[in-house]
Image (tube, helix red, strand yellow):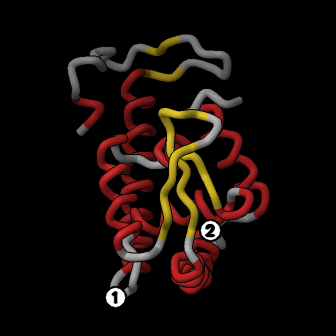
Amino acid sequence: MIAGHSWCRDKGRSEASPTGPYSCSARAANWESLFRAQHEVFEDIRSDFDSTELTQAEYDVLLTVTRAPRMTARLRDVTGNMLISQPSVSRLVERMVSRGLLTKCADPEDGRGSLVTATEDGAVAFRRLAAAHGRSIAERMARLDNDELAQLHTLTAKLRGRD
């Protein structure tokens, strides 16, 4: 349990915060709740990719690429949107190129970089899965009303340092 970790030795003491006193253990319990919710939702959503032609990682690459102008994105932008390391993204992109989902070429504006473009097959595979995946996400998020959705957006942005 997170609250039992050595970094949380407050023994119930409260710390001052802009919104009031919260103990370290209360903060840790909230962190654990957030972590578990993220994990459980992620596991539920993962089933959207069972028996499909794309893995979740491939879908994530195509999400970034198909949203870009002309369905072309810099490899570093794709990497920045992924939750895996740069070498792993590079290997993934190479596999997707060999499967005909993407093309890859040198970036004419950055000699060290690369551009990746969704092929027609890649875009079709993405759109086919995106419809079902979008419905799954919408069903999960329908548990929250509009005020809760706005609050969730505000809180997650704040936790990510983007407030």
Mark linked to residue 101: none
Residue density around tag 2, few if under 14, some if 14–19, many if 20 or more, within 10 Å: some
* Residue ID at (75%, 51%): 150
Helix, strand or loop at label 1? It is loop
* Residue ID at (48%, 33%): 112
Viewer-proximal residue, 127 or 7? Answer: 127
Compared with residue 80, is residue 52 higher up or lower down, i.e. above or below? below
Compared with residue 19, is residue 131 higher up or lower down, i.e. above or below? below
Give the total of numbered labels: 2
Compared with residue 69, is residue 154 higher up or lower down, i.e. above or below? above
Identity, as a three-letter code, of the amino acid under mark 2: Met
Q: Position of residue 40 (x, y in %)?
A: 38, 62
* Residue ID at (45%, 39%): 30
Q: Is residue 133 visible?
A: no
* Residue ID at (44%, 64%): 41
Helix, strand or loop at label 2? It is helix
Identity, as a three-letter code, of the amino acid under mark 1: Ser
Residue position marked by numbered label 2 in the rendering: 141
Disc 1 to disc 2, how far (Cα)? 24 Å
Tell me: 42 left or right of 72: left
Residue density around tag 1, few if under 14, some if 14–19, many if 20 or more, within 10 Å: few
* Corner quadrant of residue 162: top right
Viewer-proximal residue, 146 or 98? Answer: 98
Viewer-proximal residue, 99 or 107? Answer: 107
Residue position marked by numbered label 1 in the rendering: 51
Circle nearer the N terminus (1, 2): 1
Q: Quadrant of the N terminus?
A: top left
Q: Position of residue 97 (x, y in %)?
A: 40, 67
Q: Position of residue 140 (x, y in %)?
A: 56, 72
* Corner quadrant of residue 135: bottom right
Q: Quadrant of the C terminus?
A: top right
Q: Position of residue 43 (x, y in %)?
A: 36, 67
